[in-house]
Amino acid sequence: MTDTNTNQTWIILGASSTIAKAFTRSVAEQGAHVILAGRRMDDLKATADDATARGARDATPVIFDARVADTFQAIIDLASAQTGTINCAVFVGSMPAQETIDADPTLVDGTIADSFTGPARFLQMLAPVLIERGTGSVVGVGSVAGDRGRVGNYVYGAAKAGFATYLSGLRNALGRHGVHILTVKPGPVDTAMTQGLGKQPFMTTADAVVQDIHKALSKKRNTLYTKWIWWPVMTIIKLIPEPIFKKMSI
Amino acid sequence: MIWAKDQTYSGWGRALRAKGDIATPDAVEKLSNVGPAIGNRRSYGDAPLNSGGKAIDMTKLDRIIAFDRETGLLTVQSGITLGELTRVFAPQGWMPAVVPGTGFATVGGAIAMDVHGKNHHLAGSFCQHVTAITLIQDKPRKITPKTGALWLATCGGLGQTGLIAQATLQLVRTRGDMMLVTEQRASDWDEHLHLLDNSQAPYTVGWIDATATGEDLGRGIVEEGETCKGLRPTARGTKKVPFNAPHWALSSAIVKLFNAAYYRRVPKTGRTVVRTVQDFFFPLDKIHDWNKLYGKRGFHQFQCVVPLDQSEALRTIMQTIATSGLASPLAVLKRMGEGREGYLSFPMEGYTLAVDFPNRPAARALIKRLEAATLNAGGRLYLAKDALSTGPAIKSMYPDHSNWARAVAKADPDGQLQTDMTRRLDLRTPQ
């Protein structure tokens, strides 16, 4: 789909997420080596077996916790040891309900670490490797929630906004070295994270998001809204003047 | 499990509906047998429905657990589809041994219906290539063909013995992910049966023009296929039916015209074409939601099988259909072998006929007559398609029904896995 060159390695951060699993399958079927990074080893092993059966050149489960930076270097070393192109897709993030955070403000730190500072530090450590190879892609999954702070989930939104700004800077820094950075902003996706939240506006599926990601990768797009409708929707929401927006609850 | 409350859902035919709570678990550990399992609901009638109760959507449990490239033994979670397995493994030189006419069917559904495919005359039914199944009863239980009654009640057993969570399939080697397909016209019923009887191909099926009458009765196209590689197919895109069609879209005049054109599409002398495996096995999957062609009222599929020596009775059935003017373009005739695995498996050696009808009173009355004729001929109806039959009729068509009901009573003593179908046909009561 994205690249006919089979000598690809994909580091998948947050490999147990629903979208990550769909993405892993898609690159496994193209013969990539997948490094599956996450917190639950049993689940990562099962995903690795699935990827291998689907045609992955290799599938390596590794422990990664966005809040524990000690887990990062081993993954980068493992990726650096591979020949060919190294890519990284970031699916980590956590979304506690705003009320839960209101009740326990200590949750702010973890939410920001999962969605922003953890992956940012990881990518910062990976950047020299990517620059040295002079190729590769980074897929960073943010959220439309990061486009504007809303009453419903502004801590999560703030973390994703920070990550989006970080990716924008990383693009600026690495683009000149042949590394492509794609910022993905999904709206609600039918995943484990959204189960039980009921019907969401413009809901999409993990498989559809992954298809969109591959299209955006092949076109070297900078930012992808998926579904696409979120681009006009968020453009309008961003244009609402703050004095009015602060009284709204959308 | 997280439950979505009061969901309205239906089988593929959309004529029967249910309202109830549905959970879509994404990990096997979350499964419990509080309601029947459902997949992509490609059964036409009420087999995948549980009105007023709970149902567990298995489609998120779609992992490949293990694959042995030497032996072709594949272990998967039951929510994975046969289309996905074909897409993933055909390029690696392997195929599911049996695939039905739609790739959207899940492995769990294929087991619960013991489905058959275009190679039934040689390969038998789906469950004959399954070597192990993991059922979720009060606790998980792995069964194999050696298990006995519980195995026989599970294969083709409508999911009544436990949630089918995992299965091991013996895949078969394929020469490639392309099919070499020969199409021939059959000008009438006798020629049609003759071509099917004498086919030497691994995959054989007949499309039948269910609107042709008189001398043309039974005319159609016999399609024979074998796997191949290195050949390029002509590309055709995916289409989608975005809304319910108006009721006249499949009126008899239009169907007659369509069928006549479809028949003449193949030259008199026949032809050979190259198709992808997906195109050959799942021709209609490219038209997403084609069931909407039948409008909001939905449709029924009548599918029966009659013994080999009852081909005259089947000709009469065909004649009844053709003169009714109610049939749709989707009609299939196939010769089946003996292969079947479970107590309620559909196949028997003989001829099977499948025809779609829009859901109208006249069509329902016609299907009743066709069912009676099937019973008279010593044949049976396919539970994956049925929406209209009655308990006594089905029970007399399936001589092992009592064995099935007894095994199911043991496996699911509280009746938690019952569906609208088992209630409508009173299947859970032994005779």
Image: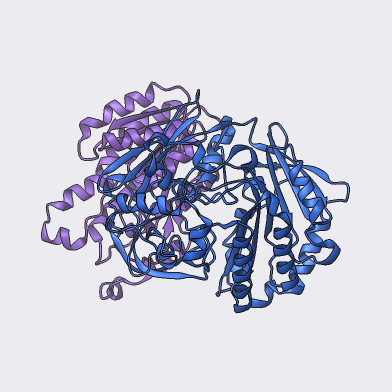
Query: Looking at the image, which residue is at 77% across and 63% down?
Result: B259
- Residue in the foreground of this view, choosing between B331 and B14: B331
Asked whether, in this view, residue A104 is left or right of residue A127, the answer is left
Residue B360: percent from the left, percent from the top?
Answer: 60, 76
Q: Is residue B271 left or right of residue A177?
A: right
Q: Could you say which chain is coloured blue in the image? A: B
Which chain is represented by purple in the image?
A: A
* Image quarter (top left, top right, bottom left or bottom right) of the C terminus of chain B: bottom left
Q: Is residue B265 visible?
A: yes
Query: Relative to A105, is B135 above or below?
Result: above
In which image quadrant can residue A121 be found? top left
Residue A237 drawn above or below residue B64? below
Look at 56% across and 71% down and name the residue there.
Answer: B298
Residue ranking furthest to the right:
B269
**Image-quadrant location for residue A201:** bottom left
The residue at 36%/38% (across/down) is B143
Please give the name of the residue rendered at 80% of the width and 62% of the height, measured from the top-left corner: B217
Q: Position of residue B280 (x, y in %)?
A: 67, 46
- Where's residue B32, x and y in %? 27, 51
